[in-house]
Amino acid sequence: METSNSKKVIVQTLLRRVGDDYAMAEKYYSLLSTINDLGLTKREIQLIAFTAVNGNISYSSIREEFCKKFNSTSPTINNMISKLKKVKVFVKDGSKVKVNPLILLNFKNNIKLEIKVEHNE
């Protein structure tokens, strides 16, 4: 396929199967971090995915569940939340901290992403 500036467009289809909603969310946010050069750590991506699947990270029961599942602490969660709010991945909705609706998907569904990487001309 040719574009107007005579560069070829290469199309590659990849398929990745995952075990559950959380695994799908983790893959999605890993890709977002990579493609946007966010430099998120694995634990931060886990927190984002966990929050996306659970709806928020504000309630103590949800935080405790995250801490148990990922061997983390409440102060660590607070530090990550602060960073993720600065880069606008997390937003405050009233008293709740949630994933920014612009990047929140329903991870019960299959996801098909179209990622374009273009030359800066």
Image (cartoon, helix red, strand yellow):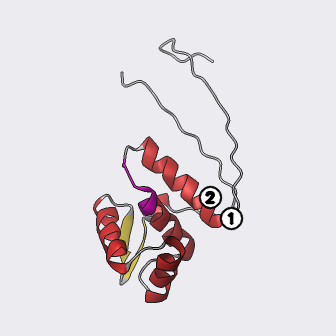
Front in this rendered view, residue 32 or 72: 72
Tell me where the magenta segment starts and ends, as one range: 38-44
Image position, residue 17 (x, y; %): 71, 51
Front in this rendered view, residue 118 or 12: 12
Q: Quadrant of the N terminus?
A: top right
Q: Which residue is mark 2?
A: 24
Secondary structure, mark 2, is helix
Image position, residue 70 (x, y; %): 50, 71
Q: Is residue 50 above or below residue 115?
A: below
**Which residue is rendered at x = 62% and y = 58% of the image?**
24
Does the magenta run of residues contain 40?
Answer: yes
Q: Residue furthest front?
A: 71
Q: Which residue is mark 1?
A: 20
Callout 2: few (<14), some (14-19), or many (20+) C-alpha neighbours within 10 Å?
many
Q: Amino acid at mark 2?
A: Met
Callout 1: few (<14), some (14-19), or many (20+) C-alpha neighbours within 10 Å?
few
Secondary structure, mark 1, is loop
Contact, CB < 8 Å: mark 2 with mark 1? yes
The image quadrant of residue 86 is bottom left
Q: Residue furthest top?
A: 6
**Which residue is rendered at x = 65% and y = 65% of the image?**
21
Residue 106 in sight: no
Left or right side of 73 for 31: right
Left or right side of 77 for 29: right
Q: Quadrant of the C terminus?
A: top left
Q: Amino acid at mark 1?
A: Asp
**Which residue is rendered at x = 34% and y = 63% of the image?**
84
Distance between the alpha carbons at the discs numbered 2 and 1: 6 Å
Image position, residue 59 (x, y; %): 44, 86
